[in-house]
Amino acid sequence: MDQQNRGFNIIEQEYQKSQAMPAVKTFMANVFTWMTVAMVITAVTAYLFASSAELIASLRTPTGGLSGLGWIVTLAPLGFVLLMSMGFQRLSPAIMSLLFIAFSVLMGMSLSFIFMVYTRSSIFQTFLIAGGMFGLMAVLGYTTKTDLTKFGSIMMMGFIGIFIAMIVNMFLGSSVLDYIISVVGVLVFTGLTAYDVQKLKKIGAGAGMNTGDSNARKLSILGALTLYLDFINLFLFLLRFMGDRR
């Protein structure tokens, strides 16, 4: 009798999984669509600012420091991330969408500075490599049967360690520590990509039975924001030791 009950439970679990899969696929498709839109907006904005002496000059003072607008562009994205994350329950899907688009523009303005430090060819090559690594880990995170929760916790601790090390190195100015930070940063955000994709897949299975409701739409935007940040950080850490400086 117990074996029969276990058999029924297995069948029921498999049936529930099969019912949830279309919703999961739709949810994940929405996540990656939003992420792609944001990446295109950021890339176009960064290129436009880097290609215009007037636009890039608006972000800097005559002595080479950040202008008032430059400081806003540098600090505002963090505020947008906090606003979208903490205001999830209060914000409508339309407002979340507008905030995410505005965030993408600000990130593009901020990233335009990398064109002043690195050659365009090395930026493009690093972008392609980062895209390949991100795609590989996204597929791994989506398809693996292994629970990555503990792995994700380790990666988050690694991220905190990187953040602390970067602050310390602002005072030390050590090229060796900078190189170590870059390598560890690549490893951490490569791992976080797989973890975050698996986490979003679980969210899609749990909350995505009705992917047309407002919460599902907002969750897809937050998911896109998470993966966007994973990719951007992976790209920037790769660029730190792979990019050719001008």
Image (tube, rainbow, N blue to C red):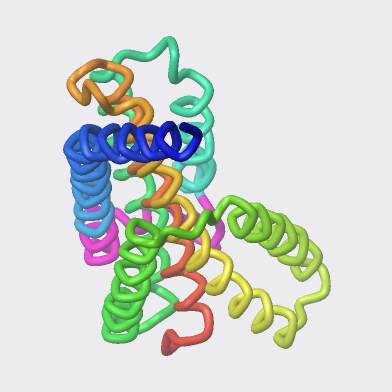
Q: Could you tell me if residue 91 is visible in this image? A: yes
Q: Please provide the residue range marked out in magenta.
A: 45-66
User: Which residue, as the protein is rendered here, is positioned at the far front?
Assistant: 1
Residue 192 position (above or below residue 30)? below
**Residue drawn at point x = 76 percent, y = 77 percent:** 173
**Residue in view at x 35 percent, y 25 percent:** 207
Q: Position of residue 200 (x, y in %)?
A: 39, 42
Say left or right for 159 vs 125: right
Left or right, residue 48 beside residue 229: left
**Residue plotted at (24% across, 48% down):** 32
Confirm whether residue 193 shows in the render: no
- Name the quadrant containing residue 208: top left
Residue 201: x percent and y percent?
A: 36, 44
Q: Let me know if residue 195 is in the magenta part.
A: no
The residue at 31%/74% (across/down) is 127
Of residues 198 and 232, the one nearer the viewer is 198
- Residue 62 is inside the magenta segment: yes
Location of residue 74 with respect to 220 vertically, above or below: below
Return the residue nearer the eye: 38 or 12.
12
Judging depth in this view, the residue of 12 and 37 nearest the camera is 12
